[in-house]
């Protein structure tokens, strides 16, 4: 069992310091993400070496359109997420606890061997929230660099500064999903908060990571022209005019099955708004 990094003893249990939730976890309990457990006063990363999903994807599917275009990547995922978006498209693996779905056994060495054996140039940590299986991702990412492979992070970027900065030297590209430029949407619909996400996006840009951003336009939640304008305004004011921005179409899923698919005209409107703010590279996804 792999001991977690980033925690401290706290009042008969532990406090996990990996993400801003700072879960207090009693003996035998788990944090919100379902994959970190306290045993005998220590925190353990339960899904280390146990991916629940592995596939080969075009890199454009991450989505990354300006990083190694035309290539394929090894996509890897373990269970768990520290957000709880009601529209999650991968809830069957993100909103379950470690051990609740079928898991493989793959060491970091074996993951890198698969990637090299298939002639793939990159590994994508994706589908769920890879930052909640930080230890496994980190160990693979270090090894991947030693073998000349690139690492791709697909994430909502809700993580503490220290683990993020420790990981960034090994991250070559990232697609970060910004849910909305609105604190109340983060709280009500995703169980998280906005400001750490924005700080982390800036930290990634400053670290020289190839960054692309995604905004899933969810019907009736974040698809108003005012909400889209707020996002574009923040991007233009914070030096992201050259960062590719993906507006993605929502399909009813998980706890929003009664909602409706994003109309294509809403995506077109979002694109027009982004261009009017001077964002240079605006892409529409899931259409
Ligand atoms: S990573 Fe998981 S256990 Fe740790 S603070 Fe975040 S939600 Fe809680
Ligand atoms: S951050 Fe992504 S994986 Fe996690 S709940 Fe939200 S949509 Fe699902």
Image: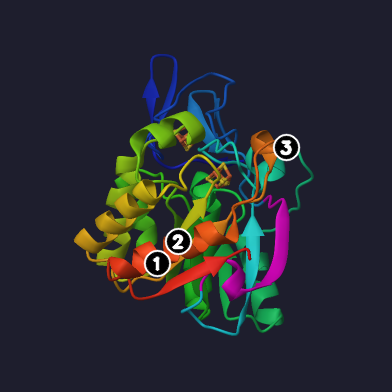
Query: Does the stretch in magenta take in 62?
Result: yes
* Residue 258 as seen in the image, left or right of residue 37: right
- Residue indicated by mark 2: 269
Q: Measure how far apart labels 1 and 3 are at the Cα level.
A: 45 Å
* Residue 100 as seen in the image, left or right of residue 11: right
- Residue indicated by mark 1: 272
Q: Where is residue 264 in the image (x, y as percent from the top left)?
A: 58, 61
Q: Label 2's element?
A: helix
Magenta stretch: give its range: 50-64
- Residue indicated by mark 3: 99
Image quadrant of ligand 2? top right
Query: Does the stretch in magenta take in 258?
Result: no
User: Which corner quadrant of the image does residue 212 belong to?
Assistant: bottom left
Mark 1 C-beta closer than 8 Å to ligand 2: no
Q: In this view, does 25 lie above or below 252?
A: above
Q: Residue at x 68, y 44 (%)?
A: 252
Residue sitting nearer the eye, 264 or 148? 264
């Amino acid at each position: 069992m792999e001991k977690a990094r980033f925690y401290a003893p706290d009042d008969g249990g532990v406090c996990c310091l990996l993400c801003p939730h700072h879960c207090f976890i009693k003996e035998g309990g788990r944090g919100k993400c379902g994959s970190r457990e306290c045993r005998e006063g220590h925190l353990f990363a339960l899904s280390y070496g146990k991916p629940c999903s592995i596939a080969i994807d075009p890199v454009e599917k991450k989505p990354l359109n300006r990083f190694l275009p035309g290539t394929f990547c090894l996509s890897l995922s373990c269970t768990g997420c520290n957000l709880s978006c009601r529209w999650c498209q991968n809830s069957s693996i993100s909103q379950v606890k470690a051990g609740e779905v079928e898991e493989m056994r793959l060491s970091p060495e074996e993951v890198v061997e698969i990637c090299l054996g298939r002639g793939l140039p990159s590994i994508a940590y994706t589908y769920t929230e890879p930052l909640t299986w930080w230890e496994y991702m980190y160990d693979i990412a270090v090894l991947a660099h030693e073998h000349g492979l690139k690492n791709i992070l697909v994430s909502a970027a809700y993580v503490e500064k220290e683990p993020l900065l420790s990981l960034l030297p090994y991250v070559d590209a990232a697609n970060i999903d910004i849910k909305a430029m609105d604190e109340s949407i983060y709280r009500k619909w995703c169980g998280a908060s906005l400001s750490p996400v924005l700080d982390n996006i800036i930290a990634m840009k400053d670290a020289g990571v190839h960054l692309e951003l995604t905004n899933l336009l969810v019907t009736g939640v974040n698809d108003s022209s005012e909400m889209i304008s707020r996002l574009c305004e923040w991007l233009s004011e914070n030096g992201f005019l050259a960062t590719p921005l993906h507006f993605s179409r929502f399909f009813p899923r998980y706890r929003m099955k009664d909602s409706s698919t994003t109309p294509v005209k809403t995506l077109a409107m979002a694109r027009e708004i982004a261009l009017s703010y001077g964002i240079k590279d605006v892409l529409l996804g899931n259409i």
